[in-house]
Amino acid sequence: MHPILFTIGPLTLRSYGLLMALGFLCGMLLAAWLYRRRGGDPEAIFDITAWIMVGSILGARLMYVAVQPAEFESQPWAILAVWQGGLVYYGGLIGACAAAWLWDRRRHGGWDAIDALTPGLALGQALGRVGCFLNGCCYGRVSAGFGLVFPGVSSQPVLPTQLYESAGCLLLALGLAWLHGHRRFKGQVFALYLILYALLRFGLELLRGDAERGTLLGLPWLSPGQWTSLLALAAGLLLMKRLRRAA
């Protein structure tokens, strides 16, 4: 566990922030390469990535506030302090989709650009979860046989679910990159990502043990990640059906 890589004067480099930045960069470069292979202009990818970066940060922060509202009751201005941590991936995905939709209304890039971005999205997640591992967040349940101890977080060995998700997202990125060159209709890559990641995340949530997940708007029985996974799964299946019919 290495949440802080080094500090030089007022500058502190956090492992989570570094891995998130690398995730954005590597995902963008992969998307530009895939888009160029299909005859697209990589500049469009760089343009939409800027929109998605802003949308994902806003969405991830707002979802965190919805899950942990008590944390901001006494100091609501802290909602703006995203550099202090507190981001939820599914909120970032919703924000990224909203930003991509706005970009498409402006540039009319359509599903070609979004499909090219999707494998890069999964690759960025793979790197981001390594950042979670180094930060000591998003860990799993107590497990003496397969667990690791995160000093300062848990005195007992817990499952490194961050690395499980990182490996799953890396495989997802590779599979979707292959599918991008063999898709049968536009939007297929993104729709399949929603389905597969929802299934992956729902299963991994069963192994999670961090109390910081909170609840989503007070909904019972399932974790916020599982409720959102069900919504993402339904959206992916519906999108797949509609796009296949329209092809």
Image (tube, rainbow, N blue to C red):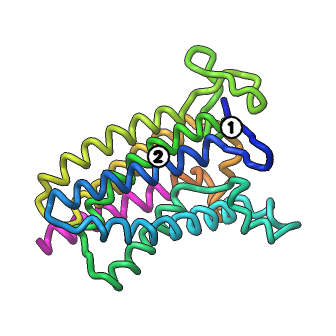
| Residue at the spot 56% in from the left edge and 67% down from the top edge | 59
| Residue at the spot 47% in from the left edge and 42% down from the top edge | 127
Mark 2: secondary structure: helix
What is the CA distance from the residue labelled 2 to the residue labelled 1?
26 Å
Q: Magenta part mainly helix, strand or loop? A: helix
Q: Sort mark 2 into few (<14), some (14-19) or many (20+) by Cα contacts within 10 Å.
A: many
Q: Could you tell me if residue 89 is visible in this image? A: yes
Residue 7 lies left or right of residue 55; in this view the side is right
User: Which quadrant is home to the N terminus?
Assistant: top right
Q: Which mark is residue 202?
A: 2
Say what amino acid the circle numbered 1 marks. Answer: Pro
Say what amino acid the circle numbered 2 marks. Answer: Phe
Give coordinates of residue 25: x percent, y percent. Answer: 43, 52
Give coordinates of residue 105: x percent, y percent. Answer: 34, 84
Q: Sort mark 1 into few (<14), some (14-19) or many (20+) by Cα contacts within 10 Å.
A: some
Q: Which mark is residue 3?
A: 1
Residue farthest to the top? 145
Give coordinates of residue 172: x percent, y percent. Answer: 32, 43
Q: In the image, which residues are magenta?
A: 227-247
Residue 29 lies left or right of residue 148; in this view the side is left
Give coordinates of residue 88: x percent, y percent. Answer: 59, 56
| Residue at the spot 60% in from the left edge and 21% down from the top edge | 147
Report the front residue among 165 and 223: 165
Quarter holding residue 86: bottom right
Mark 1: secondary structure: loop
